[in-house]
Amino acid sequence: MSKRTFITFGALLFVLAVVIPWLAFRGSGDANTGAEKVPAHLKTGQALFQTNCGTCHTLYAAGTDGNYGPDLDELLATTGQAETPEAAEGVAERVLNAEKEGVDSNTPGRMPPAILNSQQQKEVAEFVGATAGAG
């Protein structure tokens, strides 16, 4: 074999073993990769949602694709309304009530009440109220 064949083979091996994996894994690699950037005051609510709600619920701003509960972007979108603080507050109140009381909690497999403490519930409700339907 010629020297040129070895060089070509070595270059191909380098591309396959180093360059392609580097390109595939150069992303941030954290849980928030698919999440939308949110203002600093909503970051705690976003993290709590991802951890405690994202398995069941889809919410674009959290980067979650839940497979059991309703898609909150569809359910809570403020369709037909301008994005206003009042609309976001109304959605947040709905979410807070669902977190406190649960949703059809007497039926197995439905959302139980009080998964989070009251401060965490407020943070998640504020995050969802400000972001639901924005995706």
Image (spheres, helix red, strand yellow):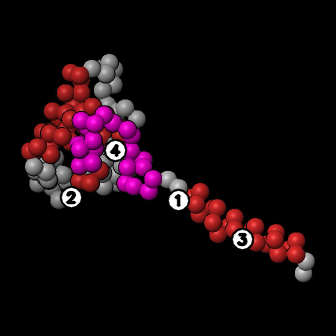
Residue 109 bears which disc, if any? Answer: 2
* Residue that appears at 14% across and 39% down: 122
At label 4, the amino acid type is Ala
- Assign a secondary structure to mark 3: helix
Quadrant placement of the C terminus: top left
Report how far apart the C-alphas of labels 1 and 3 lie in the structure. 18 Å
Find residue 76 and report its horizontal and vertical position in percent.
28, 34
N-terminal label among 2 and 3: 3
**Pick the front one: 2 or 68:** 2
Q: Range of the magenta residues? A: 28-49
Report how far apart the C-alphas of labels 2 and 4 lie in the structure. 22 Å
N-terminal label among 1 and 4: 1
Q: Is residue 25 left or right of residue 117?
A: right
In the displayed structure, would residue 130 be above or below residue 72? above
Find residue 103 and report its horizontal and vertical position in percent.
16, 47
Tell me the quarter of the picture where residue 119 sits.
Answer: top left
Report how far apart the C-alphas of labels 1 and 4 lie in the structure. 21 Å
Tell me the quarter of the picture where residue 99 sits.
Answer: top left
Q: Is residue 58 left or right of residue 114?
A: right
**Pick the front one: 87 or 61:** 61
